[in-house]
Amino acid sequence: MIEVENLTKIYGSSPAIQDVSFAVEPGEIVGFLGPNGAGKTTTMRILAGYLPATSGTARIAGYDVHEDSMAVRQRIGYLPELPPLYPDMTVEGFLYFVSRIKGVPAGDRADKVNSALKRCNIEEKRKVLIRKLSKGFRQRVGIAQAIVHDPPALILDEPTVGLDPRQIIEMRNLIKSLAGSHTIILSTHILPEVSMTCSRVTIINRGQIVATNTPENLEANLVGGTGYELEIAGDSEEVLQRLRLLSGVSLVESLPVSSGMFLPENHGLYRVVSEPGEEIGKEIAAALVGSGLGLYEMRRTRASLEEVFLKLTTTEKISSTEVESEIGENPELENPVDEPSLVSELESENQAEVADFAPSNQVNELELEKTEVADSEMVREEAEKEEEEA
Ligand SMILES: Nc1ncnc2c1ncn2[C@@H]1O[C@H](COP(=O)(O)OP(=O)(O)OP(=O)(O)O)[C@@H](O)[C@H]1O
């Protein structure tokens, strides 16, 4: 559903992302995980058609995000880091408005809006002005606007940023409930987000993909095999010998008893690590119990996703002088453009024009962003007019 091949984006002379490739299968939720500045937002914006890549391709449902941006926009829902909501519209009015912009036929709008309100659990807020909503509810309205036209793919950029712990849980549950009927890519720098929400994770660091796998496999690969910690009663030499005789074992050792920990006499702590990919918990238990040794505790231990993440992303930080000189050289950093309005669908014609005349997608980026801002202002006015009429 989402295919990204060798995507590169260069700002000035520094690459924000380099040769990024990954794919998201239909119905999957993939986490795009990386530390600050890794290139997540850049990738999400390219996927959503709001930023042209310097090179490489990205396709959604078979359509190129640059060449067929109109077709792509009809097939995606995009939640930028700062959702573009109109504070003086009611939730319902805003969703009607968005559904119209997204091309939902007039006769279907009520159904689509009701369904988005229901799925995001904001039905009781339908008549409330957006500016009166808490951050958590605004974020749900942000998701509702992304799904109101029922797109097959959702691109969510840091969907839980700024939410309190309860709102984070609610948002994760909402995202999980959307999987299956939607293919989702969500960017985050928060680890539990991916292990709790995503079936696969792609880790990006300093603009490059450093790993793609399920959270479980990433953890298992780091350790090599599965680790087991055991509390066993019996002669220590005999215990070690029994464990070493097991097949599929790569390491057996006795562990020191930490101070403050009480163990009955004749009990000891041990650690066993299996060969890569082997699960030998049952065999360990059978061998110990079969030989009359007392197995009091057995616990599987694995590297946490946090360890994997740190291992893959811990690199030297650029010095502040480098950052300053980067800012000095690049006017875009000094004058960042607002996150594009979701309603800049209207820009598509202008964008097509820009694309026609620009020799490479690198050239038209500033034009594209200017168009986004201009359109967002135009649409804001239109939205206000519509609200007054209502
Ligand atoms: N308009 C721009 N001009 C110049 N450099 C930029 C621009 N936008 C982003 N960058 C740079 O590109 C790199 C990737 O930025 P990006 O915003 O994609 O990272 P991120 O992973 O989303 O970070 P965060 O988690 O902090 O939002 C950073 O070094 C950033 O400074």
Image: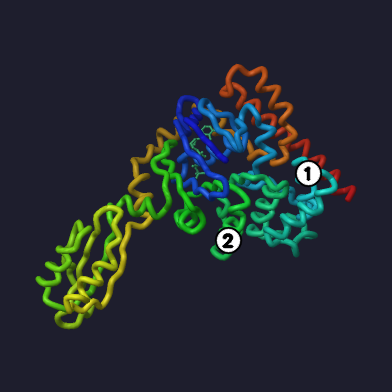
Q: How many callouts does the rendering have?
A: 2
Decide: few, some or many residues near mark 2? Use Cα within 10 Å; few <14, some 14-19, many ≥20: few
* Residue 131 seen in the current view: no
Q: Is residue 121 above or below residue 112?
A: below
Q: Residue at x 77, y 57 (%)?
A: 114
Q: Which residue is mark 1?
A: 104
Q: Position of residue 251 (x, y in %)?
A: 19, 59
Q: Residue at x 55, y 46 (%)?
A: 185
Ligand 1 within 8 angstroms of badge 1 C-beta: no
* Residue 213 seen in the current view: yes
Mark 1 or mark 2, earlier in chain: 1
Q: Secondary structure at mark 1?
A: loop
Q: Position of residue 18 (x, y in %)?
A: 45, 31
Q: Amino acid at mark 1?
A: Val
Q: Is residue 104 above or below residue 263?
A: above
The numbered dot on residue 173 is 2
Q: Secondary structure at mark 2?
A: helix
Query: Whole-Å distance between the Cαs marked 1 and 2?
Result: 27 Å
Q: Residue at x 14, y 71 (%)?
A: 239
Along the viewing direction, whichever of 335 and 87 lies nearer the viewer: 87
Along the viewing direction, whichever of 37 and 262 lies nearer the viewer: 262
In the image: residue 130, left or right of residue 331: right
